[in-house]
Image: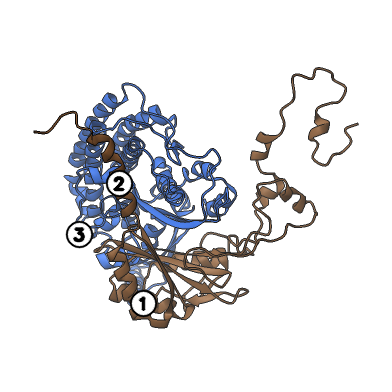
């Protein structure tokens, strides 16, 4: 039995090392990494198949459809009043905001103008849905980079907003509160003062998030310059909402479109943009948006007009033949409904233009060449909800 | 000196109302200008247009001009923001509205209803399938819906938009999967939501909604006659009247 000498061992190691070097030069065989469908960063069931070369992504392909519920087909056999129940479930963190554009489009076709108070209540709940939705994002973004505490803070403080929404609508997540011609109920007694206190709390929460995350060196290192989306690419892919504004495009449907449909014309607010287009910019813009939304809610509470909350609407709602597209600036981005009506009880065709579908379509583009851990932060900063992709 | 109790108030209100009604059909210079420019640039490619003043605008182009329209809108008119792309199947559903009890008879083998005539919406159209897309100019704040007929009816096809708007990729895959419209030149038309072995095109009107077929319209339960309370004699069970096929209860 011959013992292997040290010299032989060294030769063997050297040979292996040179092989390894050679392999690197010859481009090693890639590896396929499967992320999901169940992954904390995906807010549902999004699967990403990433083709890796070493630590870098060569090609990433999102695979959807695990939650596709076929709303566009089902809506064709639902009356207009029944549709709101379904579309509540598209973006489940900001449900009320889903109902508004549909109702606005149906009202435009019917020629109904809701009373001023109804419009203001709509706008109020719309902004509160935004705070609840994006407030959770602020915490989850911390979770994506490894900080667990912000997520708990976000869940804790979001609950106060949800309680206020529940006090009005009766539903924490699925209010089903918007009606053609107005809203279902009036605001309960004492609610306005409670909401003011909650808004103060949410502003404190924003400050807390800013101190916790944005000052953190780790957060900056993980987000600055990662996942940069230039303005032109963002526009081509139809990114909307904070994702678009983080790329420096000054476009907000609250300010720039839909004049007269919601109460934004009477309110004073700023639209925040950021020139960088990276993950950090997307976080920063959303943080400012929550702050801006709390100010909007305060203004709405102060100036809430009195009057009826329902217009005169026929008992059986038949929408006259026609087509209308109305979109609003939802928490996730532009959400719109293209309604084709033939004068029936049910819509003939409804195209749901959801924000996340477009926001995620940029993923193959933006993930090219990034490192594996950055996949999570980029996905987190794009902020999508699976119900909004798989409608 | 002005009188505090002047009788102006009742006369003012009708004036304002009259002003508002006069303002309603106002000309929309921005949108009319865009449509006029498009008509100039596209020539024969533009078939029809419609402007809802202050709200929205639509154009319909020939399917040959579909891709050129996208280029014109993006490169000349500055509509750089891609909103969505989808399709409409204008054929009336052969299964009725699924609303009335007649539907159930169709499912159970009785004769089908007389199909309604096919009619198209804003800006018209000749074919069964129409593709529609929406783009917006984020600087001048307008959006436009573009439609085109996808012919022929049995194998509809239009050129792709992916070379102009990269975001059209997924939307075209969805429209292909849901309506069976082929987008010529699309790099990889594959399923996006449905499993790859799925057959049929679910959003076509002749694709049945099975769940509604096995279970009738839930609204019907509400309008069934309630059991009467003022007829206490129990000779005939109340179910006999409500039996759907008039079957003998005994």
Rendered location of residue B150, percent (x, y): 53, 74
* Picture residue at 29% right of the left edge, 43% below the top: A263
Query: Residue A276: which disc?
Result: 3
Q: How far is disc 1 from disc 2 in space, using C-alphas?
A: 47 Å
Confirm whether residue B127 shows in the render. Answer: yes
The residue positioned 27% from the left and 68% from the top of the image is: A232
Q: Colour of chain B?
A: brown
Tell me if residue A71 comes above or below residue A152 in the rendering.
below
**Where does the image place residue A54, in percent across and percent down from the top left?**
35, 66
Residue sitting nearer the eye, B232 or A124: B232
Note the chain letter of the blue one.
A
**Residue B13 image point, x, y percent:** 29, 40
- Side of A347 where B29 appears, left or right: left
Label 1 belongs to which residue? Answer: B39
Q: Are marks 1 and 2 in contact (CB under 8 Å)?
A: no
Q: Which mark is residue A141?
A: 2
Q: Determine whether A355 is above or below A142 in the image.
A: below
């Amino acid at each position: 039995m011959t013992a292997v000498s040290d010299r032989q061992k060294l030769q063997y190691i050297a040979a292996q090392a040179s092989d390894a070097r050679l392999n690197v030069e010859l481009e090693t065989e890639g590896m396929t990494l499967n992320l999901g469908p169940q992954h904390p960063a995906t807010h549902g069931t999004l699967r990403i198949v990433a083709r890796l070369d070493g630590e870098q992504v060569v090609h990433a392909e999102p695979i959807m459809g695990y939650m596709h519920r076929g709303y566009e087909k089902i809506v064709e056999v639902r009356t207009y009043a029944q549709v709101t129940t379904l579309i509540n479930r598209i973006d489940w963190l900001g449900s009320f905001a889903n109902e508004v554009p549909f109702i606005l489009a149906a009202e435009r076709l019917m020629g109904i103008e809701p009373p001023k108070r109804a419009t203001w209540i709509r706008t109020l709940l719309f902004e509160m849905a935004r705070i609840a939705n994006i407030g959770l994002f602020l915490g989850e973004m911390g979770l994506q980079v490894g900080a667990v505490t912000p997520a708990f803070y976000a869940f804790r403080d979001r609950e106060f907003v949800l309680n206020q929404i529940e006090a009005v609508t009766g539903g924490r997540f699925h209010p089903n509160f918007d009606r053609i011609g107005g809203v279902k109920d009036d605001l309960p007694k004492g609610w306005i003062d409670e909401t003011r206190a909650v808004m103060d709390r949410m502003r404190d929460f924003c400050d807390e998030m800013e101190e916790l995350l944005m000052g953190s060196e780790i957060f900056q290192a993980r987000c600055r310059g990662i996942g940069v989306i230039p303005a032109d690419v963002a526009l081509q892919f139809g990114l909307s909402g904070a994702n678009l504004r983080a790329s420096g495009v000054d476009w907000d449907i609250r300010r720039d479109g839909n004049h007269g449909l919601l109460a934004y014309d009477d309110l004073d607010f700023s639209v925040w943009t950021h020139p960088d287009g990276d993950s950090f910019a997307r976080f920063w813009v959303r943080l400012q948006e929550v702050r801006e939304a709390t100010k909007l809610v305060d203004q709405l509470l102060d100036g809430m007009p009195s009057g009826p909350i329902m217009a005169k609407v026929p008992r059986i709602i038949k929408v006259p033949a026609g087509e209308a597209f109305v979109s609003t600036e939802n928490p996730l981005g532009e959400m719109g409904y293209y309604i084709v009506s033939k004068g029936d009880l049910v819509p003939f065709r409804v195209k749901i233009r959801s924000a996340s579908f477009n926001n995620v379509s940029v993923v193959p583009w933006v993930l090219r060449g990034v490192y594996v851990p950055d996949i999570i932060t980029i996905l987190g900063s794009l902020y999508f909800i699976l119900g909004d992709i798989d409608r | 000196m002005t009188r505090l109790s002047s009788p102006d108030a009742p006369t003012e209100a009708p004036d304002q109302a009259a002003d508002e009604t006069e303002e309603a059909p106002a000309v929309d210079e921005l949108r009319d200008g865009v449509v006029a420019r498009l008509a100039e640039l596209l020539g024969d490619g533009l078939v029809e247009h419609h402007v809802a003043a202050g709200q929205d605008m639509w154009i319909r182009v020939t399917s040959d001009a579909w891709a050129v329209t996208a280029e014109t809108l993006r490169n000349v008119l500055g509509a750089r923001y891609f909103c969505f792309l989808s399709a409409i199947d204008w054929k009336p559903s052969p299964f009725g509205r699924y609303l009335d009890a007649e539907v159930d008879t169709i499912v159970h083998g009785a004769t089908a209803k007389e199909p309604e005539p096919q009619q198209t919406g804003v800006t018209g159209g000749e074919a069964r399938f129409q593709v529609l897309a929406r783009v917006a100019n984020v600087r001048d704040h307008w959006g436009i819906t573009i439609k085109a007929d996808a012919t022929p009816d049995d194998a509809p096809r239009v050129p792709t938009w992916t070379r102009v708007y990269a975001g059209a990729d997924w939307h075209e895959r969805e429209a292909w999967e849901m309506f069976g419209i082929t987008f010529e030149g699309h790099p990889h038309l594959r399923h996006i939501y449905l499993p790859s072995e799925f057959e049929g095109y679910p959003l076509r009107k002749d694709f049945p909604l099975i769940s509604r077929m096995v279970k009738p319209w839930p609204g019907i339960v509400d309008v069934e006659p309630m059991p009467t309370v003022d007829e206490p004699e129990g000779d005939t069970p109340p179910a006999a009247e409500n039996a759907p096929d008039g079957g003998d209860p005994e």
